[in-house]
Image (cartoon, grey):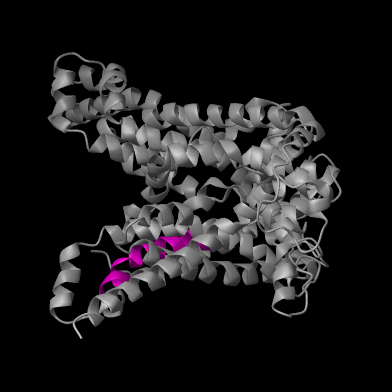
Amino acid sequence: MAVLAKGTAGKPVARSSRARERRRDIAQWMAALPYLAPSLIIFAIFVFYPLIRSVVLSMYATNSIGQMTRFVGTRYYARLFESSEYLNSLSVTARFVLYTVPGVLIVSLLLATLGNLRLKGIAVYRVAFALPLAISGATAALLFMFLYHPTLGPFNYFLDLLHLPRVGWLIDPKWALAAVAVPRIWLQAGFATVVILAGMQGIPEELFEAAKIDGAGRFAGWWHITLPLITPSLFFLLVVTTLGAFQTFTEVNVLTNGGPVDATLVVVQEIYRSFYFNGQYGFASAQALILFVIMLVLTIIQFGVIEKRVYYA
Amino acid sequence: MSKLIPLRRVASRALLYLFLTVAAVLMVYPLYNGLVTSFLSANNVYSYPPKLVPVEFHWQNYLDAMRQAPLLRFVMNSFIQSSGVMVSQLVLASLAAFAFAFLPFKGKQVVFLVFLSTMMIPWESTIIPNYLFIQGIKWDDTYLGLIAPFMASAFATFLIRQSFMSLPRDLYDAAVIDGCSNLRYLLTIAVPLARPALGTLAVYSFLQTYNQYLWPLLITNKIEMRTVQIGITMLRDAEREMWHVVMAGVVIVMLPTLALFVIANRQLIRGLTAGALKG
């Protein structure tokens, strides 16, 4: 192209300037590429290619080591919506989201409100509230596993003290999902409290002083100033904790392995079981893709509906 | 009458401290209980009522825990994985962030969206092909297999880009006129000035990787390649009801992240809130 432009003298100037522009574009790209390429290569190998391969895998029967053997089209998807196990895992996950998301938001809103008080020694309390940040899902699950222990654990001992009947926290299908949700709420509350506190500390002090002059009390100030101004933090947490809850695996895998009688069989545990233990790679890929679509749709809904009510200063 | 006002103030302050203390006790309790249990001897674990306060310091549990499972080996594996991920994220994110912040090129918006889209694709939905791929190239039970998928991160890139963009543009233009190459500018000027953001990213990515569970569970089978989070659950499986030993193991495994939490609290919190402040 460049040669052509050079050789045809007398042609409109626009053409040669376009060629020059293109040469500049290429030069700029050559300068930028070495900086972008390492990340792009990693994303291509471990994000984009696997996503496409997931779609392909979900339409094939495989042998026990995951090689595709026979095209089955959308049969796995059809089978999924008839499979009582998969439908159960969707409903378990939905309930888990409903337990943990409001749980995290309410607990962390309370903790951040307390942590935002101007009192001597408040820094110590803030550290205590943020402590779960240092703890992983697996260790949190083990800490709670002992707390839940039917005979040795403190939780049932506390029930004894209150003259309440003991609970089979992790072995009773009625309680197991809630019992798995508690360590998750505890872990995420540490993170969420830090985020909300950061939001609260960004509110200008003058707003509260103005409200005080107008005769507003502490609660009125919290309700009319603090709460509206931390809605961006709350919205961020709503999105993040919802997505996190859909991806829950560690706590379930350590505490119950999906039991008792599938009462805590969340979607990722079901995916793990399908491909890792049953060797159903295609079937599990279909499940994983549906999880992706559900999460994507929910995120879009959250941004479309709720973000309109968020107050960005 | 005039004495009543300070009295009421003292009472309301005391009430606030009461609320604060109750909340703090509830948040710390699971960890506290694990710590107390890790120092109990067997007969105190099995006695009723459960011990709620430390009654003894039975250090033997810690030695037992390390004898039951190669905990130090697990910690070392996790350190190698986490350091590998941390260093490569620092390097790759700095490079990409430099292109986004300083270099002009056509289609920057599109490349930016490509980066952003990786944050929208949940790791779980691509994990099966990734698992098959790592197995296919025989990288299971290797450090490479543990590190490679996490070497690049869009979040890390955005974090560093934000910091680069706050540097004065004139500085870059002047350096280029003086004949400073892009790479030299990145290494000798941009990176040193972005140290706080790099520190934040380092702490954040180390912690995230150290706490990983699903990926190491899938691709490590040999005991000597297990990472801490997987290894620690082995302790539970091996020891029927030896809860004091399991809790000692849990404490050992948590020590590095607890130390990081205490030492680098500010960096950690900055990293965690970085995502929230974008709005």
The part of the chain drawn in magenta is: A224-245
Query: Of all residues shown, which one is farthest toward the top?
Result: B179
| Frontmost residue, A155 versus A291 | A155
Residue A256 belongs to the span the image colors magenta: no
**Foreground pick, A99 / B7:** B7
Asked whether the viewer can see residue A12, the reply is no
Looking at the image, how many numbered discs can be counted on the residues? 0
On screen, residue A304 versus residue B24, left or right, reads left
User: Is residue A235 located in the magenta-colored stretch of the structure?
Assistant: yes
Q: Position of residue B272 (x, y in %)?
A: 42, 48
Quarter of the image with the N terminus of chain B in it: bottom left
Percent across and percent down for residue A165 are 77, 79
Looking at the picture, tell me which residue is in the foreground, A71 or B84. Answer: B84
Q: Is residue A198 left or right of residue A135?
A: left
Q: Main secondary structure of the magenta part?
A: helix
Residue B184 horizontal/vertical position (percent): 28, 16
Residue drawn at x 65%, y 37% is B252
